[in-house]
Image (cartoon, grey):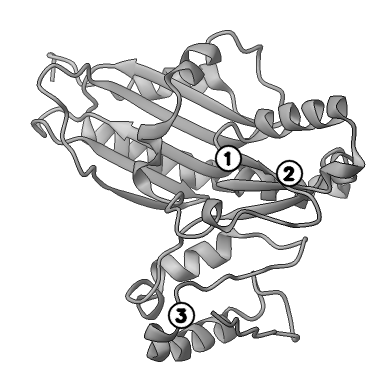
Amino acid sequence: APEDLISWDNGCVCCSIRGDLIRTLGQLSKRRKDFDAILLETTGMADPAPIVYTVQTNPKMSDNYRIDSIVCLADAKHVTQHLDEKKPDGAVNEALQQVAFADKILLNKLDLVTEEEKKTLKERLKSINKFASIIETERSHAPLDQILAVNSFNMESILEVDPNFFSSEEEKPEHRADLVQSVGIQFGGLLHAQWFNMFMMDLLRERAADLYRTKGLLSFHGQGDTKFVFQGVHEQINFGPANKPWGKDEERVNKFVFIGKNLNRKELTKSLMECLYTDDE
């Protein structure tokens, strides 16, 4: 099918022209049968969070569109120098941020690096975002079936996380405030809904800027066999029941994933476990 290109030249799609984005997508919704998907390409400096927020919270958007995936294009030859760049006055490193946000990472220009350099780079990217799929490409020849209509940006993605990730997290060294990283936490038991909600509200109020992506699988006291899931981008959280309940013999293990900076796994674990329901209630 032919593609239509629409360019906004008066600002960055992530901030100054979200009004244009809403109007354009609103107009395109009237031609819904004419296309299968819309690809929003931002600049290399863009923050994806405002786009996610706009699509999910604006009724004109959420009634007609859903976010399928967030794809980051990384230049294998030069991305390391951007990841290592120190910004003045604590400003955000856009390269780190975009890797952290991604569901898919297109690692391009692999023909310009050695096998050893590629291995080191993939390990670096995985240390930042353990859950993004890395798709190797040359000359931007990307397999479309791996980046379109894949539904990788969804609340139930926590159910697909490799269980080995959570056990390997136990062996991680103490946190470093300067790192953007993935932190996984899991423990059994039933959560107290009110206490957990209070914890999340406090965490997002105080640390939303540091939390690029969050995901969770939850079991609450008093909710029967209902399995709950959530995912978030900064302070924007989507929460609800999973498609399938807890199985009759399934162990009820709460799982949490945080991707961001200055994450202290020990403190997060302690605070989350304090949300467990006790018989003293």
Q: Nearer the viewer, residue 137 or 61?
A: 137
- Residue 72, given in percent of the width and then of the height, sits at 67, 52
Question: How many numbered markers are drawn?
Answer: 3
For discs 2 and 1, the disc positioned in front in the rendered view: 1
Nearer mark to the viewer, of 1 and 3:
3
Q: Which class describes the residues within 10 Å of circle 1: few (<14), some (14-19), or many (20+)?
A: many
Q: Which quarter of the picture shows residue 11? A: bottom right
Label number found at residue 96: 2
The residue that disc 1 covers is 132
| C-alpha distance separating marks 2 and 1 | 13 Å
| Residue displayed at 32% across by 24% down | 254
Classify mark 3: helix, strand or loop: loop
Q: Nearer the viewer, mark 3 or mark 2?
A: 3
First in residue order: circle 1 vs circle 3: 3
* Residue type (three-letter) at the residue carrying disc 2: Leu
* Numbered tag placed on residue 33 in the rendering: none
Is 174 in front, or is 157? Answer: 157
Horizontally, residue 28 falls left or right of residue 190, namely right
What is the C-alpha distance between the residues marked 1 and 3?
27 Å
Assign a secondary structure to mark 2. helix
Q: Residue furthest top?
A: 171
Residue neighbourhood size for the residue with mark 3, other residues' Cα within 10 Å, grouped as few (<14), some (14–19), many (≥20):
few
- Please state the horizontal and vertical placement of residue 259, each as a whole percent of the image: 57, 36
Distance between the Cα atoms at labels 3 and 2? 32 Å
**At x 47% / y 40%, what residue is drawn?**
214
* Residue 35, label in figure: 3
**Whether residue 86 is visible:** no
The amino acid marked with disc number 1 is Ala
Mark 2 or mark 3, which is nearer the start of the sequence? 3
